[in-house]
């Protein structure tokens, strides 16, 4: 995005782009989508933001829907199942590489290393709620900032507050909710999925790997909507699609409907729950950006916000490590620690070395993992 809109096209200045990115990092939700919405808003107002955001996510929604149906239709075939084992092993390597990459830039201070270890132990050992872990990290990060650091000059506050945007956003959220309540009732699976992913959208700090740790904790372990192995498969499929990686949540919604369709046919229920998950996940990003874009310039003078964000980023290292442990156990030791899946372990190790030592696109690593699983079957 930076190369296209700043260097090549000159649509926005480099400082404006950086301020917008900082603003998106403070918000819950996928940063890349939010940045696309902001750039569209900056160029053509509200409708520019809407068009930019929709064009950013619609291809991945359509492609992942097709991949989801392909998974449930062919995933049990021996050869396909073997390829998916390779895919899941490569995803475990991706998670490990993400931990190391983020740790390299986020754990420069002793406090941040403590936050990362604490977050890992809280999630992996104590089962602490994901939002609570991030909240504590943000508070500790903000309080630990050097009090001698002065606030920068405050940017002028816009003379209006975009109430209309917030009200329209609330209406856009309520209309599907009312429709789902009317069709399925309060206890219906689509209604539960819509409510759950609305909640998820409000705590998705730290990127897709971090939020998937929360979904693993809730949708897999508590609600039983899908298995850990299916969640790993979804992450691999999401990695192979364009757009934000958080689209994996659509797959989680899809599998929830497929695994528990009730009186409906599984394809119909899975489609409804997948679209409900995607809508609830992405709508808040549009609301946050279109309502808050006029305030982007104020972040430059708020060092405590940056310190809180640094604390969250440090905790996310531990969060992703906890996700890696959970997924690694499900993929590499499916029958317990005494019965390792040696083929998956080898693929994961090779994939990690390739990711660590080269700059190969993760998509090729995933495809190579699938091919290795296929050949080894």
Image: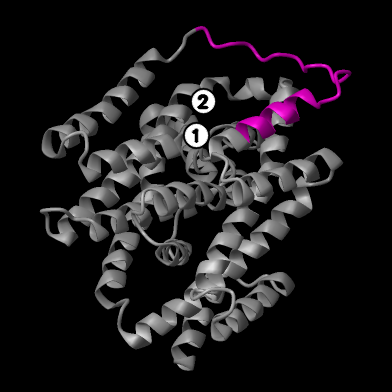
Dot 1 surroundings within 10 Å: few (below 14), some, or many (20 or more)? many
Give the residue number, with chain letter if any, for mark 2. Answer: 293
Kindly identify the residue that appears in the image at 71 percent across and 70 percent down.
356
Which element is circle 2 on? helix
User: Is there any visible trace of residue 244 in the rendered image?
Assistant: no
Give the residue number, with chain letter if any, for mark 1. Answer: 38
Q: Is 177 on the left or on the right of 139, as rendered?
A: left
Q: Is 67 on the left or on the right of 105, as rendered?
A: left
| Residue 185 locus on image (x, y percent) | 16, 35
Q: Quadrant of the C terminus?
A: bottom left
Q: Is 327 on the left or on the right of 51, as rendered?
A: right
Label number found at residue 288: none
| Residue 48 locus on image (x, y percent) | 39, 34
Secondary structure mostly seen in the magenta stretch = loop
| Residue 17 locus on image (x, y percent) | 62, 37
Distance from the alpha carbon under mark 2 to that under mark 1? 7 Å
Q: Is residue 349 above or below residue 201?
A: below
Q: Is residue 90 above or below residue 276?
A: below
User: Is there any visible trace of residue 345 in the rendered image?
Assistant: yes
Residue lying at the far right of the rendered structure: 148
Q: Nearer the viewer, residue 194 or 282?
A: 194
**Quarter location, residue 80:** bottom left
* Residue 151: in magenta span: yes
Residue lying at the far front of the rendered structure: 338
Residue lying at the far top of the rendered structure: 159
Q: Is 128 on the left or on the right of 68, as rendered?
A: right
Dot 2 surroundings within 10 Å: few (below 14), some, or many (20 or more)? many
Kindly identify the residue that appears in the image at 39 percent across and 49 percent down.
57
Q: Earlier in the sequence, mark 2 or mark 1?
A: 1
**Quarter location, residue 95:** bottom right
Q: Which residues are magenta?
A: 134-159
């Amino acid at each position: 995005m930076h190369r296209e809109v700043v260097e090549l096209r000159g649509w926005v200045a480099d400082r404006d782009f950086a301020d917008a990115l900082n603003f998106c990092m403070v918000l819950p939700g996928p940063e890349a989508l939010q940045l696309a919405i902001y750039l569209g808003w900056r160029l053509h107002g509200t409708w520019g933001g809407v068009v930019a955001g929709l064009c950013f996510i619609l291809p991945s929604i359509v492609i992942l829907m097709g991949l989801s149906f392909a998974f449930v239709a062919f995933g049990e075939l021996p050869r396909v199942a073997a390829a998916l084992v390779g895919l899941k092993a490569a995803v475990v390597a991706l998670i490990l590489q993400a931990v190391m990459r983020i740790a390299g830039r986020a754990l420069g201070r002793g406090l941040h290393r403590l936050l990362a270890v604490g977050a890992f132990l809280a999630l992996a050992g104590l089962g602490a709620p994901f939002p609570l872990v991030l909240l504590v990290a943000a508070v500790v990060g903000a309080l630990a900032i050097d009090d001698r650091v002065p606030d920068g000059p405050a940017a002028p506050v816009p003379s209006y507050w975009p109430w209309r945007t917030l009200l329209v956003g609330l209406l856009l959220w309520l209309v599907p909710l009312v429709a789902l309540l009317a069709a399925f009732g309060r206890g219906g699976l689509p209604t539960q999925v819509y409510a759950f992913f609305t909640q998820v959208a409000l705590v998705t700090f730290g990127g897709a790997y971090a939020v998937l740790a929360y979904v693993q904790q809730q949708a897999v372990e508590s609600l039983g909507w899908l298995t850990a192995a299916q969640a790993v498969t979804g992450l691999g499929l999401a990695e192979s699609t364009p757009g934000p990686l958080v689209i994996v949540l659509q797959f989680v919604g899809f599998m929830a409907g497929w695994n528990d369709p009730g009186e409906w046919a599984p394809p119909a229920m899975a489609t409804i729950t997948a679209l409900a998950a995607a809508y609830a996940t992405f709508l808040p990003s549009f609301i946050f950006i279109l309502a808050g874009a006029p305030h982007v310039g104020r972040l430059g003078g708020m060092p405590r916000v940056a310190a809180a964000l640094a604390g969250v980023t440090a905790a996310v290292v531990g969060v992703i490590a906890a996700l890696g442990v959970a997924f690694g156990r499900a993929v590499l030791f499916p029958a317990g620690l005494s019965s390792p899946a040696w083929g998956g372990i080898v693929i994961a190790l090779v994939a990690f070395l390739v990711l660590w030592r080269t700059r190969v696109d993760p998509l090729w690593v995933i495809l190579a993992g699938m091919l290795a699983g296929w050949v080894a079957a």
